Amino acid sequence: MTACGGGGDDDHPSPEPEETRAQDNRNSFAPADPTATTFAALAATADDTVDMTTTSRWAGVLQGSAYRIEVPANWNGHLVMYAHGYAGTENALTLSNPSIRRHLIQNGYAWAASSYSKNYYDVRAGVEDTNALALAFNRIAAERGRALAAPQRTYIIGHSMGGHIAAAAVEAETQTTANHKVRYDGAVPMCGVVGDTELFDYFTAAQVTAQALAGVPNQPLTNWSSISTQVTSALFTTFPSVPTATGLAYLSVVQNLTGGPRPLFDLGVAVGGSFAPVWGVFGSDGTVNGILNRSVTDTSRFTYVIDGEPAASAALNAAVQTVHPVPDANRLRRDGLRWIPKTAGQINVPVVTLHTLGDLYVPFSMEQIYNRRVAAQGNSGKLVQRAIRGASHCDFTVAEQVEAFDDMVQWEQGGPKPAGDDVLTAATVAEPTYGCRFTRNTLGPDDSATTTQLRAVIGQYAATCP
């Protein structure tokens, strides 16, 4: 009998090893607090129905990722995995608690969150490390002295890059190719990159149109630092809140790139703070900071529109650079997930998404892209999308997030499909009251100072919801 394993032979050669990339050689990441074994309980409020200090709270390190797990005394048997957003490029791996933490604990849900084992825009690591933590939940609980039954349901929620992780985690391709496989029962991606690499197409389109309108259309994208001052001064008197006449045309282009005319776009530019990060990523080589080896950027699908100016629009489209991707820059891998996992719409569990209308960093157009993909796969019956009248990136109230989560759970457990918004019909999206249906401006103790401030600004300048 011939033993299995080892090398190949001439008839059955071993496959070539997978190529490496810059991200694979970044090995200095480490948890910011590698010795943590627990974390603080939530501060009590007068409305709490559960003593927050009675939860089991465990912290530690799993396969290079920091983690937190919280299980209430009256656990309902359901586990919620939380995926945090982009954490930058530093070596310290940090954690975020879910913004609906209080609601989860008061209603008996356990939750867990991973720091992921690497920073940068590493959605592959985010999915794998979140899944690995979900699979280790019972073992960790037993090791900490609390034996628990296996979760009856496991849900996943996330913000921004974490929204990409949450959406990708329930995709058929992910569930087939991931090394750590988890069958989630439902997902709530919030302000998520649910158009995956098409986000980077938008960033590039925003740059090439800025350059063209500023009179430097043919400068290489990677030369941005040498022309950024010239382009910025051509388009803005004060960036980004006071555009020049040319800048007004440019912002019309950006509006159409990010989802079309809609409420809160102007406030998103003026006070939301989410367009400056877009400007900050100009100059990219298309590899997403070394997550890929070759450029994935594709602007060939865009026709740029300056509203009410057909001649100017035509001139812009004639002048602007077109950027094409390198074929298979984000191909399927043999060693696990794609380097940037896809959100192709191959879903078979309930998914409820939230997106703010004033978000220009991960724009509302992500929802339109995702809607079309899900529909193309015949899975629209599994998707509900909601527009929120927030002026910035991930600018949700806790009440909006709680409602989406509860509606997803009730739907998954046999209730009716919850209501959502039409994200595709241009006339509907442009209505002054669009987004009112699921906007909840009631603020509570866990709402951020940014959301509290911006909702007050919206109330001063935007149409009031009925």
Image (tube, helix red, strand yellow):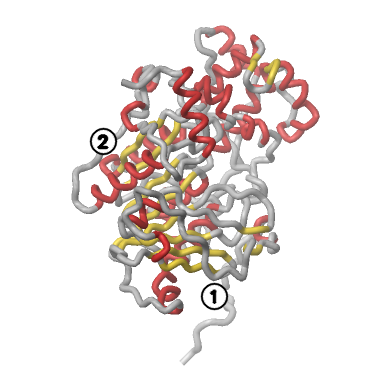
Q: Position of residue 443 (x, y in %)?
A: 41, 37
The answer to which of 326 and 459 lies nearer the viewer is 459
Given the image, on which type of amino acid does mark 2 rest? Ala
Q: Tell me the residue at 31%/54% (across/down).
A: 49
Q: Nearer the viewer, mark 1 or mark 2?
A: 2
* Res 14 visible: yes
Q: Position of residue 136 (x, y in %)?
A: 44, 71
* Res 336 visible: no
Do labels 1 and 2 touch, CB within 8 Å?
no
Q: Tell me the residue at 33%/42% (across/down).
A: 404
**Drawn side of residue 390 relative to residue 306, left or right:** left
Q: Residues within 10 Å of mark 2 (few under 14, many from 20)?
A: few
Q: Tell me the residue at 50%/84% (across/down).
A: 4
Decide: is 47 above or below 455.
below
In this view, which residue lies farthest toward the bottom?
Answer: 1
Decide: is 407 above or below 29.
above
Given the image, on which type of amino acid does mark 1 rest? Asp
Q: Which mark is residue 419?
A: 2
The answer to which of 347 and 152 lies nearer the viewer is 152
Q: Earlier in the sequence, mark 1 or mark 2?
A: 1
Q: Position of residue 306 (x, y in %)?
A: 54, 14
Q: Which mark is residue 11?
A: 1
Q: How many marks?
A: 2
Q: Tell me the residue at 52%/25% (across/down).
A: 257
Decide: is 170 above or below 199.
below
